């Protein structure tokens, strides 16, 4: 049995875990996932942990395992253009709110990774700092969000070749910076992010 389950068991009723992927990247959407695990199927999740601690290949394998262990789950994404129009924090919280409200069952407790809670009227929301390393429900949500976003970025790599999105997933690596300097920005770059904005201004100038 996964040791992270003990954290969730301190709460009564139907427990939902919520996490996001993609706050830091210079390109692509931010994605959030919400899960309600089936108590009778959590034994399937012995290998589930914080998605950042698991290899990309293993996360891919766990994606369907997590889905199979859910009573209900939902995923939401907010595009780079919307992030630029608002900001990354409000976009992340909106994605978390959206996926939680899309669940087919209303949870008694919503465990949200981090220290900021989405505005979910009528829900009992509890923030958990480093929640993906403490709560099985949040860790399961982190895998869904991360894998879903990685798949989006691999598709964008085909749409916008040359940037290396399949490898760095939009994060600010040297490969990404070199590609930006060479090619300029593309349709999924977050122009409100300083390194991207500086290159966009330089290319225009």
Image (cartoon, rainbow, N blue to C red):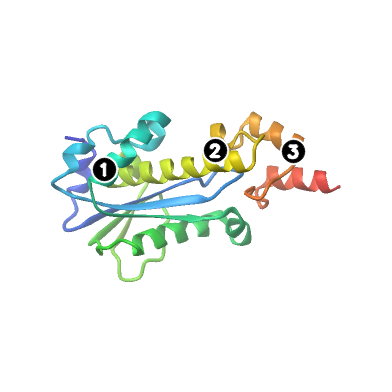
Residue at image location 60% in from the left, 45% down from the top: 27
What residue did someone put label 3 on?
183
Q: Would residue 91 be seen by someone viewing this image from the given angle?
A: yes
- 202 versus 178 height, above or below: below
Quarter of the figure that contains the N terminus = top left
Name which quarter of the figure residue 174 lies in.
Answer: top right
* Residue in the image at 15% along x and 48% along y: 39
Return the disc, 3 or 1, that comes first in the chain's sequence: 1
Residue position for label 1: 136
Extreme residue toward the bottom, this view: 122
In 3D space, how far apart are the residues under numbered discs 2 and 3 (Cα atoms)?
Answer: 17 Å
- Residue 117 appears in the picture as rendered: no
Disc 2 or 3, which lies upstream in sequence?
Answer: 2
Q: Which of 119/55 is in front?
A: 55
Q: Mark 2 Cα within 10 Å, few/some/many (few <14, many 20+)?
A: many
Judged left or right of residue 203, residue 57 is left
Residue 59, percent from left and from top? 37, 34
Is label 2 in contact with label 3 (beta carbons under 8 Å)?
no
Q: Residue 88 at x, y = what percent?
A: 55, 54
Residue name at image x 28 percent, y 36 percent:
48
Callout 3 crowding tier (Cα within 10 Å): few <14, some 14–19, many ≥20: few
Residue 173 as seen in the image, left or right of residue 77: right
How far apart marks 1 and 2 lie (CA) works out to: 25 Å
Determine the CA span between mark 3 and mark 1. Answer: 41 Å
Seen in the image, is 57 located left or right of residue 69?
A: right
The circle on residue 97 is: none
On the image, numbered disc 2 is attached to which residue? 169
Whichever of callouts 1 and 2 sits on the residue coming sooner in the sequence is 1
Which residue sits at x=79%, y=48%? 201
Viewer-side residue, 130 vs 163: 163
On the image, the x and y values in percent for residue 76 come to 43, 56
Where is residue 105 drawn, in percent x and y? 24, 63
């Amino acid at each position: 049995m996964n040791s992270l389950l003990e954290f969730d068991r301190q709460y009564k009723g139907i427990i939902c875990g919520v996490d996001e992927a993609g706050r830091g990247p210079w390109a692509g959407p931010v994605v959030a996932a919400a899960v309600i695990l089936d108590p009778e199927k959590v034994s399937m999740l012995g290998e589930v942990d914080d998605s950042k601690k698991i290899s990309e290949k293993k996360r891919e394998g766990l994606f369907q395992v997590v889905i199979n262990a859910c009573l209900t789950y939902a995923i939401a994404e907010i595009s780079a253009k919307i992030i630029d129009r608002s900001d990354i924090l409000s976009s992340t919280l909106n994605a978390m709110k959206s996926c939680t409200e899309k669940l087919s069952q209303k949870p008694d407790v919503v465990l949200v990774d981090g220290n900021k809670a989405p505005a979910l009227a009528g829900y009992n929301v509890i923030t958990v700092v480093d929640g993906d390393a403490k709560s099985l429900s949040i860790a399961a949500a982190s895998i869904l969000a991360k894998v879903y976003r990685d798949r989006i970025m691999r598709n964008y790599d085909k749409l916008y070749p040359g940037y290396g999105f399949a490898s760095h997933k939009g994060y600010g690596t040297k490969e990404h910076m070199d590609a930006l300097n060479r090619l300029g920005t593309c349709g999924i770059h977050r122009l409100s992010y300083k390194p991207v904005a500086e290159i966009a201004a330089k290319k225009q100038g």
